[in-house]
Image: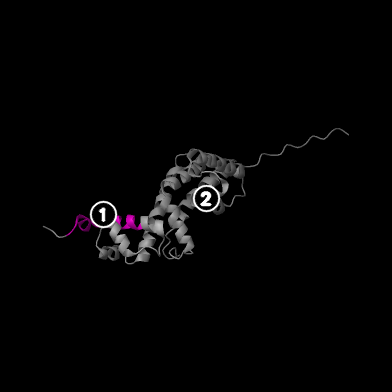
């Protein structure tokens, strides 16, 4: 009988178990408070497998960030393809951000931990969290909206994407502090629906092409 466990005999499964365990632990406790031994214990693998597949604890944290970031990028592209007009595409995107952040709290927590680290794992060399692929798709949608006369012409596209993310992210990143200070439950489905509806109104009122001002008729002299 082989002395190797099933996890050791299946390289892809072993790597996935290590990665999933690291995402759970890093999201809960941050980079510094998690040891490789804890990850190994959660993943139920041999410790040397961590170094075999990832090389170091830092590289494992980078892989965890990359994994959760790929999840949101996937829903971004899927969301905009569900709309017909530029406005519908961007509406689906905002709705998907709210849904994703509800379903994937690990994304929010990992990003918060990495920002506390001043983004030291997100170097220009590894390009882990580049928004360039989706930014170009987002830019094309906005430009279509401008060309059709739906959106105003003076939009700064990268800033607009930041606003999209930020307006949705705050409901999840600051959920508990805002719930306490405003005496409202941001985890409540109805409250989140109200928030999303207001985000949609704010965004589309803000980016809509202004209606031409009708000249005021002067009374006869």
Q: Between tags 1 and 2, which lies in front?
A: 2
Point 55% across, 47% down: residue: 143
Point 58% across, 44% down: residue: 203
The quadrant in which the N terminus is found is bottom left
| Mark nearer the N terminus (1 vs 2) | 1
The quadrant in which the C terminus is found is top right
Residue 170 got which mark? Answer: 2
Residue to which mark 1 is pinned: 13
The stretch drawn in magenta includes residue 36: no
124 lies left or right of 57: right
Query: Could you say which is closer to the camera, residue 5 or residue 149?
Result: 5
Q: Secondary structure at mark 2?
A: helix
101 lies left or right of 200: left
Q: Secondary structure at mark 1?
A: helix
Give the answer, above or below, for where 6 lies relative to 207: below
1 lies left or right of 130: left
Name the spot of residue 104 as percent of width and height, x first: 41, 49
Residue 183 got which mark? Answer: none
Give the answer, above or below, for where 39 lies relative to 80: below
Pointer 2: residues within 10 angstroms few (<14), some, or many (20+)?
A: few
Give the tally of numbered discs: 2
The stretch drawn in magenta includes residue 8: yes
Measure how far apart labels 1 and 2 are at the Cα level: 34 Å
**Magenta-drawn segment:** 4-22
Q: Is residue 134 visible?
A: yes
User: Based on the displayed image, in which of its 4 quarters is residue 11 positioned?
Assistant: bottom left
Name the spot of residue 159 as percent of width and height, x first: 56, 53
Q: Main secondary structure of the magenta part?
A: helix
Name the spot of residue 18 as percent of width and height, x first: 30, 58
Q: Are circles 1 and 2 on residues that touch, CB within 8 Å?
A: no
Q: Is residue 151 visible?
A: no
């Amino acid at each position: 009988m082989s002395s190797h466990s099933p996890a050791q005999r299946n390289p892809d499964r072993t790597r996935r178990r290590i990665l999933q365990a690291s995402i759970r632990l890093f999201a809960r406790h941050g980079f510094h408070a998690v040891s490789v031994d804890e990850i190994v214990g959660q993943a139920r693998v041999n410790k040397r497998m961590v170094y075999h597949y990832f090389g170091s604890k830092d590289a494992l944290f980078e892989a965890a960030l990359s994994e959760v970031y790929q999840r949101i990028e996937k829903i971004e592209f899927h969301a905009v393809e569900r709309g017909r007009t530029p406005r519908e595409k961007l509406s689906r995107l905002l709705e998907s951000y709210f849904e994703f952040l509800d379903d994937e709290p690990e994304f929010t927590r990992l990003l918060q931990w990495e920002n506390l680290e001043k983004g030291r794992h997100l170097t220009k060399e590894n390009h882990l969290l580049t928004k360039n692929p989706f930014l170009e798709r987002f830019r094309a949608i906005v430009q279509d909206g401008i060309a059709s006369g739906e959106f105003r012409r003076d939009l700064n596209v990268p800033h607009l994407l930041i606003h999209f993310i930020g307006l949705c992210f705050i409901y999840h990143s600051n959920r508990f502090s805002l719930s306490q200070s405003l005496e409202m439950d941001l985890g409540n489905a109805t409250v989140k629906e109200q928030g999303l509806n207001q985000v949609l109104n704010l965004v589309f009122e803000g980016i809509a092409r202004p209606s031409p001002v009708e000249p005021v008729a002067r009374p006869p002299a």
